[in-house]
Image (cartoon, grey):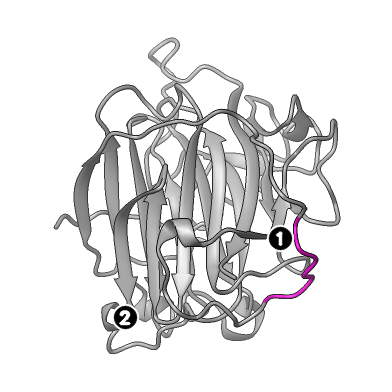
Amino acid sequence: MKNHSILPHSFRFRKAGAGALLILGLLACTEEKKPDIPTPTPDPTSTASNAEAKDYGQYTELIWSDEFNGSGAIDGTKWTAETGGSGWGNNELQYYTTSTENAYMVGGNLIIEAKKQSMEGRNYTSARLITKGKRSFQFGRIDVRAKLPKGQGIWPAIWMLGSDIDQNNWPACGEIDIMELRGQEPNKILSTMHYGSSTATHQYKGSETTLANGSFADDFHIFSVVRSKDKIRSYVDGREFYAFTTSDTAPYAYPFNNPFFVILNVAVGGNFLGNPSTTVIDTTPFPQQMMVDYVRFYQYK
């Protein structure tokens, strides 16, 4: 097990907590883009069904998705673009915008683009998209097929926060980091769970996995989380590399049986991974893009 220092994507005033990482090697695979899929079953609200844990492949009923098949602006019925440049408690350098220069659809993909562009006192712009207030997810499997950026100081993330964050605050609401990547380590991803009764008691546990060949910037990969009652499992390309249960949060409450919303973003710099190099040419060329083919939520019948 290996400790790692991760700061939250939520309000980022995280203090260091107890953490553990199990490092597992993984030879990931890719798949053909956009296979035919069934029409999603209408379901505007989160459901507490599917509490029993099933195998990854048993979650076959598509409940909700965004295939990003349009062009231009994101679907405002599914996503909200958060804004701000406060550093997010982690000394990040970007300003999150609502601009279609930073988040847009093209060629069947969502593009989240970090640009070297001055705005509101910040030297970079990017986007952070959330389903909060539009769709929450409880038990089932979430798949995000994405191609990640790379480079010193680039921080793409696919993650979730408890939908009760406005009532219970972070980290009591819980945080599920489905995937995070340090741009200077483009062949390695992390999955981490954050919990605790307050920022003073913040704890986290997680795992990392490494591609045997190439990087996550070379091709699309499927990043998944499966949630059942009292258990969370993290996957890449259908292969499990981390499991987390109620015993992991003791003596603190286990918040992960509640509804959560999804967040997609690309951050620039900060305490988690350092800033883009200003002295080494081409260490971090801009713009940087995270390409997302789809976000899908499945349950078993």
| Quadrant the N terminus occupies | bottom left
Query: On the picture, is 86 further left or further right than 52?
Result: right
Q: Residue at x 69, y 38 (%)?
A: 36
**The disc label shown at residue 249, or none:** 2
Q: Position of residue 44 (x, y in %)?
A: 79, 70
Q: Note whether residue 204 is visible.
A: no
Q: Residue at x 72, y 34 (%)?
A: 102
Q: Which one is earlier in the sequence, the residue at label 1 or at label 2?
A: 1
How busy is the neighbourhood of tag 2: few (under 14 within 10 Å), some, or many (20 plus)?
some
Label 2 sits on a secondary structure element that is: loop
Query: On the picture, is 84 further left or further right than 268?
Result: right
**Which residue range is magenta in the image?**
40-46
**The disc label shown at residue 131, or none:** 1
Q: Nearer the viewer, residue 189 or 43?
A: 43
Amino acid type at mark 2: Thr
Q: Note whether residue 287 is visible.
A: yes
| Quadrant the C terminus occupies | bottom right
Q: Residue at x 69, y 29 (%)?
A: 118
Q: Position of residue 96 (x, y in %)?
A: 68, 44
